[in-house]
Amino acid sequence: MFTYAAALVFLVFCVRVVLDPRRFSNAVLLGITVVLASVSAFVRPERPPVSLRTTALAACALLVLSALALAFLLMANGVKMVRREGSRPGNLLTLLTGLAVLGFLTLLGTAAVGRSPALVRVAAFATPPVGYVSFLFLCFLGYALLYGRLPMRRDVDFVVVLGCGLVGGSRVGRLLANRLDRARRLYEAQAARGNPPLLVTSGGQGGDEELPEADAMAAHLVAAGIPEDRILREDRSRSTEENLLFSKRIMQEVKPEYRCLVVTNNFHVFRAALTARRTGVRGQVVGAPTARYFWPGATIREFVAVFLHYAKTNLGICLALGLLGLVALR
């Protein structure tokens, strides 16, 4: 039964990806498919109860060991982030996440061994929401990796590059340079086919910046050999949503029935795609490389942003699951 259910959910997933890959529900469907397929691989009528019990215990042990390994890897990455990037709140995210995972495992172990009624109730309340958030995160991570590898249109009218702040108030940093280099390669590949796109550099001027990000980005592209008359500047935006909304207006003025590619860093691709769909931008999102040590914290930050975008729904589900955990304890 689980095998058929997994096949059906996967079929729905494939259809929805073809219709529009920029949906978070696609990530959830992919996660449900994996869960159903995993259950079907272990739960079979011909297996004796003892074998099923042994398999379940082994799976639980593997899950705990994996969570422990993840906690220590996250904490090690957090220490590296602080050493290389400083102790700003965003750079502490992997360290704090690792500590949270370790703290939750400690709570479960203490509740199981100590049998304290208060700790058991706390664990019963916390476990279902933690499971829900973990499931959503794995869905987000898995589909984000898949989305970044989906084939995109070869020829588009525009390539939009999202800004991400200037170093020292005036210089293009490594993250932004990677985005611009990816945009340049897309431009050159299409220009070689005789149909060069227009490049849109998108980014306003922050309070600590000497010029709009769009201007610094355009100068970087011109220095890399892109003709200045192939660059349009969107210099008012302060967020990803504004990047896309304001760039959309520019593209519609030039060509109402446009198609575009949006360039950002790989950790930001899926959230940018969700935002592009929400703002009505006609195009997909592609990623540029990111330093490996920077990727885990940035990915967690992206997931938190998506989770909080639907805060009322997600927090309501977490509360309901926590209460169900307490009810099941009785």
Image (cartoon, helix red, strand yellow):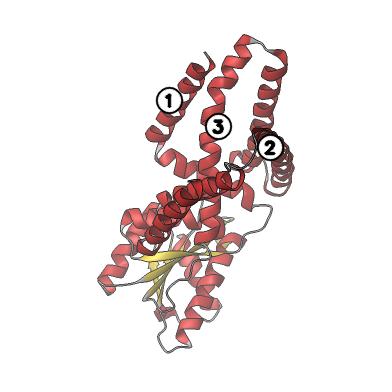
Q: Nearer the viewer, residue 124 or 34?
A: 34
**Side of 79 relative to 39 (left or right):** right
Q: Nearer the viewer, residue 210 or 58?
A: 58
Residue 173, label in figure = none
Residue named by callout 2: 51
Q: Nearer the viewer, residue 170 or 238?
A: 238
Dot 2 or dot 3, earlier in sequence: 2
Crowd tier of the residue under label 3, counting other residues whose Cα lies within 10 Å: few below 14, some 14–19, many 20 or above? some
Foreground label between 2 and 3: 2
Q: Is residue 237 visible?
A: no
Q: Is residue 276 visible?
A: yes
Residue 31 lies, in percent from the top left, at 51, 48
The image shows residue 126, relative to residue 237, as above or below, that is above
Residue type at numbered disc 3:
Val
Kindly state the secondary structure of the residue where label 1 is placed: helix
Residue named by callout 1: 320
Kindly state the secondary structure of the residue where label 3 is placed: helix
Quarter of the rendering containing residue 97 = top right
